[in-house]
Amino acid sequence: MSPLFHRRSEEEKAAEKAAAQARSDNAARSDERTAASLVQIEQGHIPVAASERLAQFTQAGAGPTAFSSDLGVSEWSALARLGITPITQVMGSSIYHVGWQPTYYNVPTEVRVLSDAYNECRRNALNRLLEEAQLCGADAVVGVRIDQGAHDWAPGALEFIAVGTAVRLAQAMRDPSATAVLSDLSGQEFVQLCQAGMRPVGIAAHTSVHYVPATGQTQMAQSSFGGAFGGPGGSWANQELVDFSQGVYEAREKAMGFVAAQVQQLGGDGVIGVEVREHGRTHAVRRGMYETKDLEVTFHVMGTVIREDPALASRPAQPPPVQILSLR
């Protein structure tokens, strides 16, 4: 019986060797795909696995038969009445490291390091969302939602995640000269816009971060020293912090100016559904004998750019013929 056991052991060794070689080959292929994905992301694109999955939607007879979406029932039914069909959910993501910026400024100014970080991070996320939509053969992405976050394992980093549903328009609604169009409108809003003869052409967005140092009057208002001696800027008196109010306006105007420029670049007539988010934080600063608080205000603006296209407008429905019977 010894030769039989010896022969079985050799077969097991051969099987183990083949399995080990297969695992090694799989690990090598996985490493190659990971390296390729990193190169893709460095160039602003999406990973290899996402590209391969989305490309299946454009293969004749080989694409997935079921769709996925984040549409509600009312959104889906509104789109379906216009012949707009969902394809799949698409996503774009970017985590961005914020570079060094001075602790504080002595004059009101835009903090370009922060503004550029916000805008570049959002641009990466939206570009990857658009790339996913194009790969799956979509004409538009509806209900684009951008979530902004941060992580405790990356202090000072920004993250933007853009999510939406890629859809295919009816033949009569397609613009042959355009690529996939992004819109943050809901399904019902998208339909209502098209029925009114307006076409979404893209998303305009910008962030502006402004630093506002406290003026002497604001420093007095923030301190209890002025109020204790009845000073005009004492903290016991109600008053507007004029320099801080002005800083908020400057941040808003800067952001809206860039959004208006993007509308022109996209060939739009205007922007609708503009979402404005503002938040501020203070920085404790010591100037001379006094410790005061400066303001850092951040303005986020985003909306859907639209262009007039009368060909999309719904024709008024013809009333059905009415039969009138005489009672005489």
Image: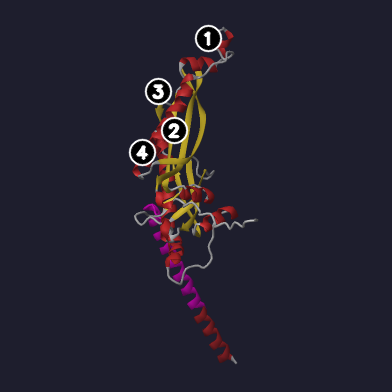
Amino acid type indicated by mark 4: Ala
Relative height, residue 21 to residue 153 (above, below): below
Q: In this view, does 162 lie to the left or right of 269?
A: right
Spatial CA distance of label 1 from label 2 is 31 Å
- Residue at mark 1 to residue at mark 3: CA–CA distance: 23 Å
Reading the image, the residue beneath label 3 is 107
Where's residue 217, x and y in %?
Answer: 48, 14
* N-terminal label among 1 and 4: 1
Q: Answer whether labels 2 and 3 touch (C-beta < 8 Å).
A: no
Note whether 324 is above or below 105 in the view shown: below
Identified by mark 3, the residue type is Val
Residue at left offset 41%, top offset 64%: 32
Q: Which residue is drawn at 46% across and 67% down?
A: 27
Give the crowd class for mark 4: few <14, some 14-19, many >=20 residues within 10 Å: few
On the image, the x and y values in percent for residue 253 come to 41, 30
Please name the residue that numbered disc 1 is placed on: 232
Q: For marks 4 and 2, give the CA distance.
A: 18 Å
Residue 70 or 263: which is nearer the viewer?
Answer: 263
Identify the residue shown where x is 45% and y is 72%. Answer: 61
Which region of the structure is painted magenta? Answer: 16-45
Residue 294 in percent (x, y) is at 48, 24
Quadrant in which the C terminus appears: bottom right
- In the rendered image, the vertical position of residue 125 relative to residue 11, given as above or below: above
Q: Name the residue under label 2.
A: 209
Q: Element at badge 3?
A: loop
